[in-house]
Every structure is written in C-alpha cells, then in structure tokens.
Image (tube, helix red, strand yellow):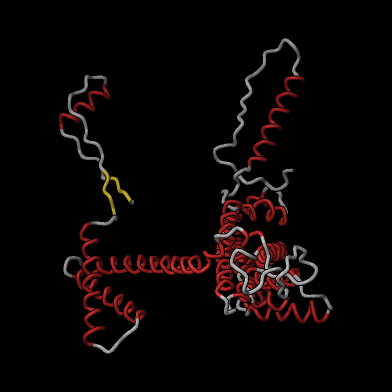
Amino acid sequence: MTTLDRPPVAAPASTAGAIAGATTGAPAGAASPRPETRVRLGGVTPEDVFTVVGAAVGSLALNWMLYERVLPFSGVFGFLVCWYVLFLAGYVTLGQLQWGRLMVRDRLVSVLAWSSGLLVVALIGDQVYYVADRGWDAAQHLNFFTESMERTGPLNPITSGGALNAIVGSLEQLGMATLFAVPLGIAAAVFMSEVGGRMARPVRTLVEAMTALPSIVAGLFILGIFIITFGFDKSGFAASLALTVMMMPIVTRAAEVVIRLVPGTLREASYALGGSQWRTVWNVVLPTARPGLMTAVVLGMARGVGETSPVLLTSGFTSQFNADPFHEHQVSLPLYIWNYVKQPYPDMIARAFAAGLTLMVVVLILFVTARVIGGRKPGELTRGQKRRIDRAARRAEADARAARPSGTVQPAVARTSSTPAHPTVPLPGNS
C-alpha cells in the first residue's frame, strides 16, 4: 500500500510557547503537537467491489438472454467472450455514473490487468488439473517411477511398467544440453555486449535468426551432420546436441540483455583500479548479472525440456532402461508421451498423462533450484566465503599475537564472524 505523509499541523500558540520554553530551558506547557497522520493511496473500496460485481452479474444476465433467446449463437467459448466484452462495457457505464473520465480509464485498465492475470492463472490451473486427472491412475502407483516398459505390454495392468527410463533419459539429455548451451550462450553474449567489433552485428543477427528456428530443423541438422555424415548411432548424446541448438540462442539473447543492464560505472571503477577487460567481466560484470543469467538459463531449459521432434530424430525410441547416453537408443519424457498417448489402450494413455505430470514436476524442481542458486544479491558472499574470511581473520590474529613481545598490552582486535552489512563485489586484481 502506498502511503503519503501529511505536513505537520501548525501548533497553537500555547504549544509553540511550550516548545520555545523547552528549547530555552523553561518549563514546558501541558499542550503537545499533534502527531503526523498517513494518507493511504490506492486500495479497494466497497464501491469498487460493488461496481465489478454489478457489471459481472448484469452482463451475465444480458449475455444469457442474447444467446438463449435472441441471437442464433451457441458454444461455450463464444459465450465467455461475449460475456467479457459486455462486462467491460457495463463496467465503463457504471463507472461513468460515479467517477470522472480519468478515474474511469484508470479503473478500466486495472480491471483489464487483473482479469488478464486471472485468465492466465486459470488456464494454467486447468491444464495442470486435466493432466493430473488423466494421469493419476498411473502416477499413484510406485512402479511408475521405479520400472520401465521393458517387460510390459499394452494389455498389462496399470500396476506393471513405468517411466523410469524416460525420466533418467530426460534428466541426462537436458543436463548435457545445459552443460553445452550455457557456456556457449554466455560467451556469445559477453562477446556481443563487451567485446563488440565488426563481428558483433553478424553474430547477433545469426542468434536472432536461430531463436525462431523450428525445432525439427535442429533435429534434422544433427541427424544429417552427426549421425548420417559421421556415422554415429542415435543416442541420448545426439539428442542433447539437438537440444543445445535449440537452447543456445535463447540463453544468448537473454544473457546479452542482462549484461547490458549492468551499470557502466562498475566497469569504469574496475578499469580505474587497474583491472583488465577479462578481469572486469569475470569479477564485476558476471557476478552483478548473476540473477539475470540464472533466469536466462531457466528460459533455455524450459525451451529444451519439452522438445519432441529433435529428440525423435536423434535419440530413437526404446522401452528398455538405458542410463548410458553415448550408446544405443534412449527415450525421454516428451518422446515417451508422444509414443504412448496415441495408442488405443486406456492404460497406455494413463501412463502418457502420468509422464506429462512428471515432466511438469521436473520442470518445477529445475526452476526452483535455478532461482535458489541465482537468488543471491550481487556481491553477497556465500557461506564458504564467509568461513574462509573468518579463518583468515583468526589466522592473522594468531600470527599477530605470536609476533607480539611478551609483557606488552594486547590491543583490542575488532573481528566479527559475519559479513559486513553492505558486501561489495570483489575488486579485480585481488587474489
């Protein structure tokens, strides 16, 4: 809630005299100045609630009458769209009866923002509920997470078989793709934003073109170069290369934007202290942009974890458990879903939806982990760095005590085991 302090109220004559007497040493009077009050800006009033509810109920009734009695329309989607349009029109009409023109525009924008956010949350919740409802029959059994489909057929019960091979394959392929794409993407972003030169523009154009690259083209590229030309077999490693092609431009574009947001004064301070360009980038720019870089990594992982077509062309499909991504076929969760959801057996379809629910959980875990790792503020020390600083301080204190002659008065040594209130980024050139 935004607050605003009112100016202090002028004190009466007796109060002013009491204050003046207090400053001069005279006894103060009985009166005292009134305390400052806060004015609350924004918030939701009963009129706002009643206006929204009235517009929603009235537009629903009018929309139902038009759909059912007057117009030859049908369908749930059209009903909801018309209801929303009538709701906005009714809200503007009711607002004009009680507010000014500027206030009506402000409230209308607020309603549009809130309704758009609620719509997005509702759509996501509906998707999660639908996948969880269809796949709960298979996901509630432990064998789904501990067994593969090697010895399970289409007519076997739901208590047999699982997606362990697909879970392991997805984690290995996504991990290797992240290991390849993140260093390359951040290095390309540093080149475009810090180094520059004549090659910066062509590289940026190529990265922007690769951002809109269809996923199947990345699969065809790895299939033609890595598998057909060089003669390697389809494997999880080949699938990770295809995912790398998809993830690298996303990481590069997001990382470049984040690095450009680092204040130029930090670079100038590093150069003024004698730091070279690569020391400035390594010790100042990248630590400052760490939270944004983690967001770039998350965006790249989100792009690669759900890809099906490049994995289909490069990894092959197998129902057996294969933890070696460099040899033989290896299945992943998207490929597992694509293969089993199109079969005419209810248990197979349930397994596919359970794999989709598992994929959502894996993505959620990856996102939370990335945010926790990159959630520290720029310059904030880790626990290991704090412990090293404490050990160095204790060692220096012990050395100073040992070097001091006996009989001298020991000076007070101020040492704390915690970091300063405002930690700074390590200066370039310091070891």
Name the quarter where the C terminus is drawn.
top right
In this rendering, the answer to whether 85 lies above or below 179 is: below
Q: Quadrant of residue 277?
A: bottom right
Closer to the camera, 173 or 376?
Answer: 173
In this rendering, the answer to whether 217 lies above or below 129 is: below
- Residue 299 picture location, percent across and down: 58, 65
Q: Is residue 183 visible from the viewing direction of this image?
A: no
Residue lying at 27% horizontally and 57% vertically, measured from the top left:
44
In the drawing, does residue 77 fall left or right of residue 382?
left
Closer to the camera, 97 or 198?
Answer: 97
- Residue 158 picture location, percent across and down: 59, 66
Q: Quadrant of residue 361?
A: bottom right
Closer to the camera, 66 or 409?
Answer: 66
In the drawing, does residue 390 fall left or right of residue 11?
right
Residue at the right extreme? 231
Q: Quadrant of residue 398?
A: top right
- Residue 192 picture location, percent across and down: 66, 67
